[in-house]
Amino acid sequence: MTAWTGTARLVRLALRRDRILLSVWLVAIAGLIYGVISAEVALYVDEAQRYAGASFGAENVMSRIFDGPASGTSLGAMSWVESFLVLGVLVAIMSSQAVVRHTRLDEETGRAEMIESSVVGRHARLTAALIVAGVANAVVALATTLVMVGSGLDLSGSLAASMAMAGVGMTFASVAALTSQVSTTQRSANGLAVLAIGIAFFLRSVGDALGTVAPSKVEVIVAWPSWLSPLGWGHQVRPFHQNNWEVGLLYLALCAALVGLAFRLSTRRDLGAGLLRDKPGPVRAAPGLLSPLGLAFRLHRGTLLGWGVGMAVMAYAFGVVGDSVDDFEEVSPQFVEFLEGLYPGAELIDIFAAFLMAMLAIAAAGFTIQSILRMRAEEASGRAEPVLATAVGRRTWLGSHAIVAGIGTVAVLTGMGVAGMLGYLTGGGDLAGGWSQFQASVVFIPSVLALGAFVLVAFAFVPRWASLVAWGALVVALVMGQLGELLKFPQALLNVSPFTHAPKVPAEPFEALPLVVLTVVAVALGGVAFWGFRRRSLAIPA
Amino acid sequence: MAEAITTMGLVKHYGTTLALDGLDLSVKTGEIHGFLGPNGSGKSTTIRVLLGLLRKDAGEVRLLDGDPWHDAVALHRRLAYVPGDVNLWPSLSGGEAIDLLASLRGGLDIRLRDELLERFQLDPSKRCSSYSKGNRQKVAIVAAFASDVELYLLDEPTSGLDPLMETVFQEVVRERTADGRTVLLSSHILAEAEALCDRVSIIRLGRIVETGSLDEMRHLTRTSVHVHTARPITGLGRMAGVHDLVTDAEGAEFEVDGDRLGPVMERLAGFGILSLTSTPPTLEDLFLRHYGDELATLGGNGNGKGKRDGQSKRGGGRP
């Protein structure tokens, strides 16, 4: 028996367990690439427009931070700059979570103990996890190439782009191999990996922002911090522009170093143990925790903070560019035409604010759904049972979570509004425009609450399906709200989404009635959920 | 209130699976009542119905003179529950979880809590995520016994505890019930029930098949006797209530029904007893009387008098 005995079997087991999850990732990533290229084709009809777009992106600091360094005017390169950060972050999350799932999570749940007690070598589990990540990234790279070539881009550029995708994926798979050795829980191993992704994002945004525009005016020469970031390297490959293959060596070297370190650490620790010690917690509970509401707040607070900060940063960024929308006129008349078509007669600047905030509001509903589904997690894991066996009634328990989710929703959307306003003022806009940003966000509060109440009903009546119903509802809302009008869906279908009914301030005049109706619907659905939850058995494993 | 818990004809289905099949359980106020049965026999389901966490499909349930479904909150103030599989919030410390559960029940005796932490040797500053199964179980036990309640519903509370902690647990239960509190203790550890319980009920396939005090139950079963006598024993085989008799020149081995022990002893005396050992039936013997056939189909020595393998037996129920 060697240190790797059993690796092949573990790889098969992992692929069997992940077959659906990884397929979803793959389809999502491939679909996104296809969508971005199609959008770029539609936005820029000729070289002149692409030149205008690329030079705008090269000059604009916000574009540099959120897209990356402009790399010429070819369709492929512009699509790459436009989409790589999102793709890179997605593939990094996919890869790091896969590795954590098959290393630290297995140790945490005790599955690893059973596996390692059988004929399995010391390094087999970690190796298998990395191989699984490797397989996933290879398939993603293949799909990237196929989609890009299929969209009419040239083969060598497509291969260079695929290399960058796989490079980022494997780098963060290696990072996760390391964080899985360090932390004792899946949660913190994933958290550290996401932190690493965040640092990589930050480093390259600093480097890209501090970069200089090349004499061609359509290319940015980045500053050194971008070269410290694996995400930055993905831009430096500059597919469809320079195809810098040698950047692949950076990925190889970093992966090798991280994986080597992870294996070293894994042999120095016991199964189940980590290198980071858990800090001791309080011996006594603070008085604030000792109520159903206190517990609910404690359980939701991390989620709330993450979403609140994340959405505020996005809203701020959109606010900053909000004032420069008039520049789009020359950059992309198609995009402007599309926007103006949404709300004929409104000012472009208002349409832009309404359009972006509507997108952010649907994204923010992710917080609401996640926090309401937390109840299902509490129930399914058996943590709700001891609480409901105390003097906490069903209504109180459901109410505490619903209140925290509801107030959290109001806080996230209000925070988005304030951040959008501040961003707009930072970007040189006036106070009235800033106020519009604020309104554009908070006007969606009743819509998000109505969606949340719907999820609450699903939890109350079909607990085992609640998660599927909830995320399905969000997808429907997204499709109806953002794409429905584009795809010319019938109005009856669009009306299914609560987002359809909110007035798109400031592009549309403010109307109180739909908001009142949405609020009433939310309250009524909430009432139904309370009634239903009081009447059902807990859905817990017997 | 003579009875803390009464169920009559309790029925509960999970989909098409019948979990409780007309369960009649009666727990007197002030007693420690053992609720015995293997995994999957319906113990946890019964307790969850008693807590109003699951809806009954049919039958009657009374708990502390109330309806556990409709009066759940009011009743829960008067009872404490230890689940069989304790799951806690990974980010909370053990101390926080104890304070929280006891406070939500309506009262926490800090002095008692600290004393229990000491006795169970539980470090309350550790995160729940880093506790072993036994330590999570201790968190629930401490939270339950740090509350001043009338009734304790304990669902296999000592699973995962080491023998030392099991002894501490038994001491704590005895202390807390000295002043008339009631305990329903579900278990498949028969030694624990034997040590603690005033009365026991044996559940099988969702029904109570035997209930009563250990003495009453023993009376209904046989005692094993091993005797050495000065003269060879005669005529024993003709006596009523004597079974499985083996005699030789020096004495005999047999089993005798509990209520026929007196006459048998009188007859033995006439042969000059040199030594005599009698073994009363253990709870395990009682238990296996009801599960012996199942053991036989599982490939055990299904004579209903099996020895130590009773505790490792598993019913084929849900996980």
Image (cartoon, rainbow, N blue to C red):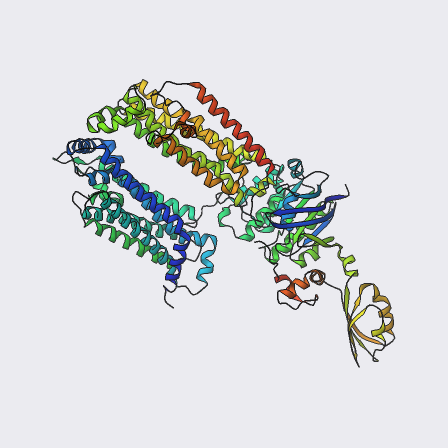
Query: x and y percent of residue A449 in the render?
Result: 46, 29
Q: Is residue B164 above or below residue A239?
A: below
Give the quadrant of residue A437: top left
Which residue is found at the position 44% from the left and 47% from the top? A278
Query: x and y percent of residue A325 in the render?
Result: 25, 25
Q: Nearer the viewer, residue A85 or A390?
A: A85
Please identify the residue farthest to the front as the structure is shown: A490
Looking at the rendered structure, the number of numbered marks drawn on it comes to 0
Q: Nearer the viewer, residue A34 or B296?
A: A34
Q: Nearer the viewer, residue A142 or A162?
A: A142
Classify the position of the N terminus of chain A by image quarter. Answer: bottom left
Which residue is found at the position 35% from the left and 28% from the top? A357
In the rendered structure, the answer to whether residue B127 lies left or right of residue A511 reads: right
Q: Is residue A413 above or below residue B279?
A: above
Give the quadrant of residue A342: top left
Query: x and y percent of residue A420 in the render?
Result: 33, 26
In the rendered structure, the answer to whether residue A272 lies left or right of residue A56 reads: right
Please identify the residue farthest to the left as the structure is shown: A215
Q: Is residue A176 above or below residue B53?
A: below
Which residue is found at the position 80% from the left and 64% from the top? B258
Work out whether residue B298 can be spotted.
yes
Give the quadrant of residue B70: top right
Q: Nearer the viewer, residue B144 or A293?
A: A293
In the rendered structure, the answer to whether residue A202 lies left or right of residue A305 reads: left
Work out whether residue A268 can be spotted.
no
Query: x and y percent of residue A313 in the render?
Result: 34, 32
